[in-house]
Image (spheres, grey):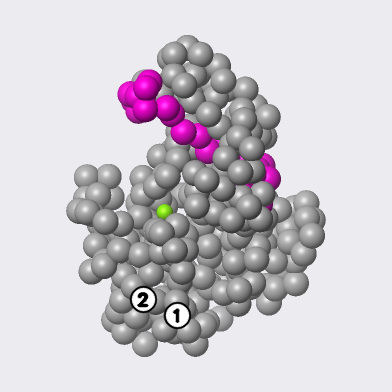
Amino acid sequence: MISVPYPVIFTDLDGTLLDHHTYAWDKAMPALEKCKEANAPVVLVSSKTRAEMEPLQRELGLTDPFIVENGGGVFFPLKGSLPPPAGLEQDGGFLKMSLGVPYPALCKALDEVAGVLELKAKGFFKMSVSDIAELTGLSMQEAEKASKRDFDEPFVIDDSTPADDALLRAEFRKRGLELSIGGRFYHVHGKADKATALDKVVAWYKTNGFQVISVALGDSQNDFSMLRRADYAYYLGKGPAPVEQVPRVIQAPEPGPSGWNRVILDFFHNLPA
Ligand SMILES: [Mg+2]
């Protein structure tokens, strides 16, 4: 087999491919088209749920695997061009790879930790769909999808009891869990993170004979593990690039989808033929 470099694009959604406020991605269209033209898979990687990501995947015209709930699970297309990994559970038109901790255990731990640290914390499991809609800016229909969770519990902490992030993380770790800090929410989940899930997807392409070049794009702390793991890492956030946490990170000239467009077009332009 002739081995040619095979770029696989791993992208966060909110604030990265999707505009932080409007959730629009139209400014990234030229680069998304370029990925299609170059046969480069675009793997969506988000804190979002499967119910939220599946329609987006369809709207974007993608047929690649996607990573849900901060790396808690990977959905592989059942009828894609490559054989899916063996031994996975079928779930609708996908095969589900579970990497995370089951949801009820996360909710219980959040209650315990909030009690120990005397924090007024509130997770999605204690919010109504309209609470979630209000906090996220999502429509009721979208908020309903966001509430269907498998591997990750988003939560907020009331301003009256500000949290020390290091203490909070330490309490979750005592329970075998991890804390991620996203653009809008704290998230508690198992040890699997976006990097763990990226590894599984890269391994799958490699098993199928591809010489993968992984390219990761993100804007928040919950993307840093994935940015560290990838061959090329782009920071799409506002403010300075996190060079301490991700030494090789490249800062996009603009945040969000317009930055996405620029860095991906540049990436392909500079890729040796
Ligand atoms: Mg984000």
The region drawn magenta spans 145-166
- Contact, CB < 8 Å: mark 2 with mark 1? yes
- Report the amino acid beneath label 1: Met
Q: Residue 187: x and y, percent?
A: 49, 37
Question: Looking at the rendering, in which quadrant would you find the N terminus?
Answer: bottom right
| Observer able to see residue 230 | no
Residue in the image at 78% along x and 55% along y = 91
Work out how far the residue at label 2 is from the one at label 1, CA to CA, in angstroms: 7 Å
Choose top left, top right, bottom left or bottom right for residue 251: bottom left
Residue in the image at 38% along x and 69% along y = 257
Q: Can residue 108 be found in the magenta stretch?
A: no
20 or 58, nearer to the observer: 20
Q: Residue 139: x and y, percent?
A: 59, 56
Q: Is residue 230 left or right of residue 147?
A: left
200 or 149, nearer to the observer: 149
Labelled disc at residue 29: 1
